Each structure stands twice: as structure tokens, then as C-alpha cells.
Amino acid sequence: MQYAGVGDPQLVLAEFRAGLVLVPQTGPDGPVWTGDQGGIRWIHAFTDEAELVAFARARGQQSGAVDYLTVRGARLLDVGVPAVGVPAGVALNAAGSMPMLFPPVRGIVPDAVALDGAGGAGAVAG
């Protein structure tokens, strides 16, 4: 594993891809929660309900009750990120003590939507 520049980033990515994450939605059939920062749309994902509730409360949702999807990290990176339609990555446990970012670069997301990929800077498959 790696955190804060120490460890094996490939192991972190492999564990994320193999694991299940919670992706909050605006409603039962609504879009997933995202945030824009630095020209990238970040899909919010969480490792457990406690992390998700903490983030919901930080966003002003007092009850902490949130609709969410449970998806494998690989599906989120390989299908969810390209579906966004703009440069996108995944922000894991954004309100937690150990947040992580999976940016839109080769080796993390499909090359066609990676900022440094085959599609060119900022390209999105369509």
C-alpha cells in the first residue's frame, strides 16, 4: 500500500480496482455526486458508510442519509469515468482522515479518456 508518498502505488490501485466502494447519488435514480477542481470532475466514492455519512454531513446534510450505489472500483474507473464526458477521476473518502485521488491518467483510467492518453490532452471518448 501507499499513502502520502510512501509504499507501492500499484498495490493501492489494484486494491481499489478489486474492492467495492459506495458512490453517493442525488436520489434513488439520480446522478452520482461529483465535484469540480482543477479542471477535473471528481466522482466521490467511499470505502464504507461511516466515511460516506461524514462527507454528507460536511456537505450540510444533517441526517447523513444518502442514496448510493455499490460498485467495484474497476467498474467505476473503466465505465463510470468515461461516462462523465469530461476529464474525470475518483476522489476516495474525501472527508476522511486518509483521502485518495485516482486522477484521469494512463494506468488508472482508460487511455481514451486519460489526460495523457491516446485521445490527447483532455480528450473524451464519445
Image (cartoon, helix red, strand yellow):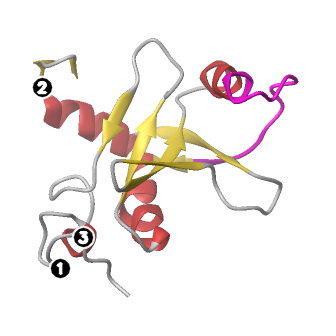
> Identity of the amino acid at label 1?
Gly
Mark positioned earlier in the residue sequence (3 or 2): 2
Between 122 and 32, the one lying in front of the other is 122
> Nearer the N terminus, badge 1 or badge 2?
2
Residue beneath label 1, please? 119
Q: Distance of mark 3 from mark 1, alpha carbons?
A: 8 Å
User: Residues under labels 3 and 2: Cα distance?
Assistant: 27 Å
Q: Residue furthest top?
A: 97
Residue topped by disc 2? 8
Category of crowding for the residue at label 1, using alpha-carbon neighbours closer than 10 angstroms: few (below 14), some (14–19), many (at least 20): some
- SS type, badge 3: loop
Instruction: List x then y, in percent, for residue 86.
Output: 40, 69
- Give the vertical position of 15 relative to 63 (above or below): below
Specify whether residue 62 is painted magenta: yes
Q: Which residues are magenta?
A: 56-70
Q: Which residue is tagged 3?
A: 122
| Residue shown at the point (25%, 31%) measured from the top left | 12
- SS for dot 2: loop
59 inside magenta stretch: yes
